[in-house]
Amino acid sequence: FPVTIGSHKIMIQCKAYLITGIDAGQIQFTDVNPKEKKIKLTLPPVEILTFNIPPNEIKTISLDVGFFRDNFSSKERQQFETIAEGKIKEQIKELNIVAETEKNAKIFLESILRSSGFVSIEIQSSPSAI
């Protein structure tokens, strides 16, 4: 029968803060007709502009280090933080962050274009790699 001599488990909880956006310099104007007050453009892909997991927001929820095992090293904890960052980035699509960023960019640009006199505004999005 299997015998476990020493366990080595940790559960970490963290909060992550991220800011997403588009590079306005990469907007592609595909059709601009000031006389007809018409404009078409394509937004660049949404990007993660900043991603931060503050050290004070990392909490050890559960720690189980058996008698025959050493505690977790700083290097191991840093590896867990890297894994956590990857897992959070994987969930960005599920959280609708890309769609919300595109929606907000379109609202912002449409407002600027309308105040500049354009009436017919068509804004498309580029697929995001996030």
Image (cartoon, rainbow, N blue to C red):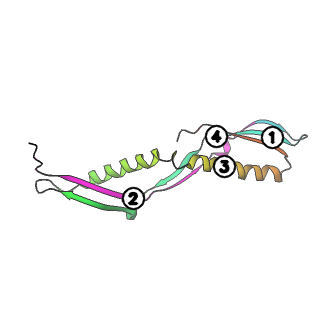
CB atoms at circles 3 and 2 under 8 Å apart? no
User: Element under label 2?
Assistant: strand
7 horizontally vs 90: left or right:
left
Q: Quadrant of the N terminus?
A: top left
Q: Give the range drawn in magenta.
A: 1-29
Residue at 29%, 54% (x, y): give it.
77
> Which residue is disc 2 drawn over?
14
Mark 4 or mark 3, which is nearer to you? 3
Locate residue 27: give its quadrant: top right
| Mark earlier in primary sequence (3, 1) | 1
Outermost right residue: 35
Q: In this view, does 112 lie to the left or right of 20?
A: right
Magenta segment: does it hold 3? yes
Q: How far apart are marks 3 and 1 (CA)?
A: 18 Å
Q: In which quarter of the image is residue 33?
A: top right
Q: Mark 1 highlights which residue? A: 39
| Mark 1 crowdedness (10 Å alpha carbons): few <14, some 14-19, many ≥20 | some
- Residue highlighted by disc 4: 44
Say what secondary structure mark 3 lies in: helix
Q: How crowded is mark 4: few (under 14 residues within 10 Å), some or many (20 or more)?
A: many
Check disc 1 and report its element: helix, strand or loop.
Answer: strand
- Disc assigned to residue 26: none
- How far apart are the two marked residues, 1 and 2, measured between alpha carbons? 44 Å
Q: How far apart in space, not on screen, are marks 1 and 4 (Cα)?
A: 16 Å
| Residue beneath disc 3 | 103
Distance in Å between CA atoms under marks 4 and 3? 13 Å
Disc 3 vs disc 1: which is toward the camera?
Answer: 3
Disc 2 or 4, which lies upstream in sequence?
A: 2
First of labels 4, 3 by sequence position: 4
* Dot 3 or dot 2, earlier in sequence: 2
Q: Residue at x 36, y 58 (%)?
A: 13
